[in-house]
Image (tube, rainbow, N blue to C red):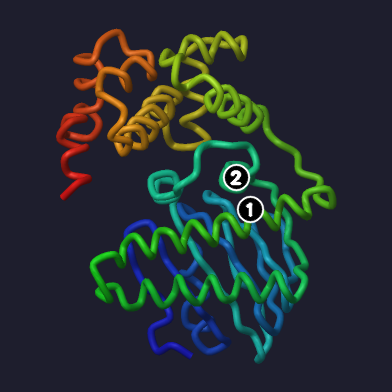
Amino acid sequence: MNTNPKYYLSGLEIYNLKKDTLEILSKRIFDGNFFSILLVRSGALSIQIDDTVKQLSSNELILISSKSSCKVLNFDDTLQIYLVSFTHKFVFKNSIKKPNIGYFELFITKSLHKISLKSKETSILIKTFKILEDNKKYSNRHIFQNEVLLFTFNLLLYEVAGIYQTYSHHIKVKHSRKEKLVFHFFTILEIHYKEQHNVKFYASSLFITAGHLNKSIKDVTGKTAKQWIEEEIIIEAKKMLQNDDLTISSISEELRFSSPSFFSNFFKKHISISPSEYRSRLIL
């Protein structure tokens, strides 16, 4: 058992807990501002999430959404759990995905259920937890430590998302109107972000006002629709700048900017350097 089971990075916390440490930390391991992935490796515990009591035992996984009130009620002597907690800001900033329904549902929906895993699924998750834990613990291992940590974090997210998708036909999830709106927005965004930069286009496609769309998306994800649109453009621009065969002008045209100078100003506003400077730094 680790003498210090918690490793800290702003927006990300990792726990490997057994009975003794859980007794000490049970009142403060769950923060309402954090989203948590909890896996029971052995033993059993009872946990209250909002007004619902969940009984968890070996090989069971549960996702606890942010803004949930969570309290550990009791647990047995053989308990060992893995817990990774992170803020919406951390996951949306550091995940390597492009928006899609199956992935985002994990971090938006408040009514996800526990899942009883097969031994192979549990084994894969435990290995990923351990790699994440080790990379966080030895934070000065090498110059690419931060990249390794974030890629491992993303690996865990994709494994969990894949598991929930596999078991989704057994889980009856009721989405709120805002959640459904977010899913529809990201579906449209993934198709049209290159040529459609205006919130009004997405709002019209959803038959609502731009103001209502911005507010709804921010309420659920912490960012406005406009911020998501601009972030997708920046992600794509960065990818395209890695291709030396593409000129700044051709990238600007592909992303439907009115001129290369307008594209450069947009890029610099978000990244603090120009596209050409960004490209030159990739070579260093």
Asked which quadrant contains residue 36, the reply is bottom right
Q: Amino acid at mark 2?
A: Tyr
Give the vertical position of 126 relative to 226 (above or below): below
Q: Nearer the viewer, residue 143 or 180?
A: 143
Please state if 113 lies on the left or on the right of 281 as rendered: right
Residue 205 place in picture, x, y as percent: 59, 11
Q: As drawn, which residue projects farthest toward the front?
A: 245
As helix, strand or loop, the secondary structure at mark 2 comes to helix
The reply to whether dot 2 and dot 1 touch (C-beta < 8 Å) is yes
Residue 49 place in picture, x, y as percent: 64, 59
Q: Which residue is mark 1?
A: 161
N-term-proximal mark, 2 vs 1? 2
Asked which quadrant contains residue 45, the reply is bottom right
Residue 96 place in picture, x, y as percent: 45, 47
Q: Which residue is mark 2?
A: 103
**Label of residue 94 in the image:** none
Please state if 223 lies on the left or on the right of 53 as rendered: left
